[in-house]
Image: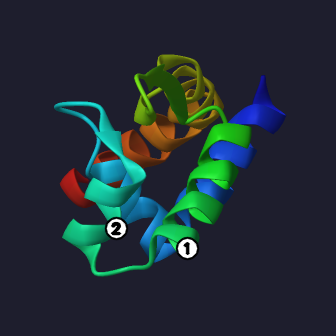
C-alpha cells in the first residue's frame, strides 16, 4: 500500500532512525546495544524504534527480560512497492535520454 510505503520512507528520513535501521539487518538487537553503538540515550532509541515499528520497518520480540528488535519485511515490501510505481516512467526517461544522446 502506497501510504505504508510513504510512512516507511518518512521514518527513514531521520538520520538517527536510519542508523538504527541500518544496525539491524544481521542480528536482532536490544535498545541498550543500539544506544551504546550509536552513542544515543536508550530513551531516544526507544522513541525512534516506536516510529520505526509504526512504519512496520522493525519488529520486536521479547527474549527473557529484554526486547530484541529486527527488521520487519512487511515495511520493506511496502517501501519497495511504493518506489516500484515510479520505475516505468524513470526507465522511459532514461531510454529517451540515451536515444537523444545517441542521435
- The residue drawn where x is 73% and y is 40% is 54
- The residue drawn where x is 73% and y is 47% is 7
Q: In the image shown, does 36 or 63 lie closer to the viewer? A: 63
The label number, if any, that marks residue 35 in the structure image: 2
- The residue drawn where x is 60% and y is 47% is 52
Relative horizontal placement of residue 88, taking residue 66 as reference (left or right): right
Relative horizontal placement of residue 1, taking residue 62 as reference (left or right): right
Give the image location of residue 22, x and y in percent. 29, 51
Asked if 7 appears above or below 40 in the picture, the reply is above
Relative horizontal placement of residue 101, taking residue 71 as reference (left or right): left
Give the image location of residue 37, x and y in percent. 20, 68
Q: In the image shown, does 75 or 100 lie closer to the viewer? A: 75
Q: Can you identify the residue that label 1 sits on?
A: 44
Q: Which secondary structure lies at badge 1?
A: helix
Which callout, 2 or 1, points at the residue further toward the start of the chain?
A: 2
- The residue drawn where x is 41% and y is 30% is 71
Asked if 62 appears above or below 30 in the picture, the reply is above
The label number, if any, that marks residue 21 in the structure image: none
Can residue 70 be seen in the rendering of this structure? yes
Give the image location of residue 17, x and y in percent. 49, 63
Pointer 2 with pointer 1, Cβ within 8 A: yes
Give the image location of residue 96, x and y in percent. 42, 46
Residue, far right: 3
Q: Which secondary structure lies at badge 2?
A: helix
Query: In which quadrant of the rendered image does the N terminus lie?
Result: top right
Residue, far front: 65
Amino acid at each position: 500500500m502506497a501510504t505504508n510505503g510513504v510512512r516507511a520512507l518518512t521514518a527513514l528520513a531521520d538520520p538517527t532512525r536510519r542508523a538504527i535501521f541500518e544496525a539491524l539487518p544481521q542480528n536482532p538487537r536490544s535498545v541498550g546495544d543500539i544506544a551504546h553503538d550509536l552513542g544515543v540515550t536508550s530513551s531516544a532509541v526507544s522513541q525512534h524504534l516506536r516510529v520505526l515499528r509504526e512504519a512496520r520497518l522493525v519488529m520486536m520480540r521479547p527474549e527473557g527480560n529484554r526486547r530484541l528488535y529486527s527488521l520487519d519485511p512487511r515495511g520493506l515490501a511496502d517501501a519497495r512497492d511504493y518506489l516500484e510505481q515510479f520505475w516505468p516512467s524513470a526507465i522511459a526517461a532514461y531510454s529517451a535520454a540515451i536515444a537523444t544522446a545517441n542521435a
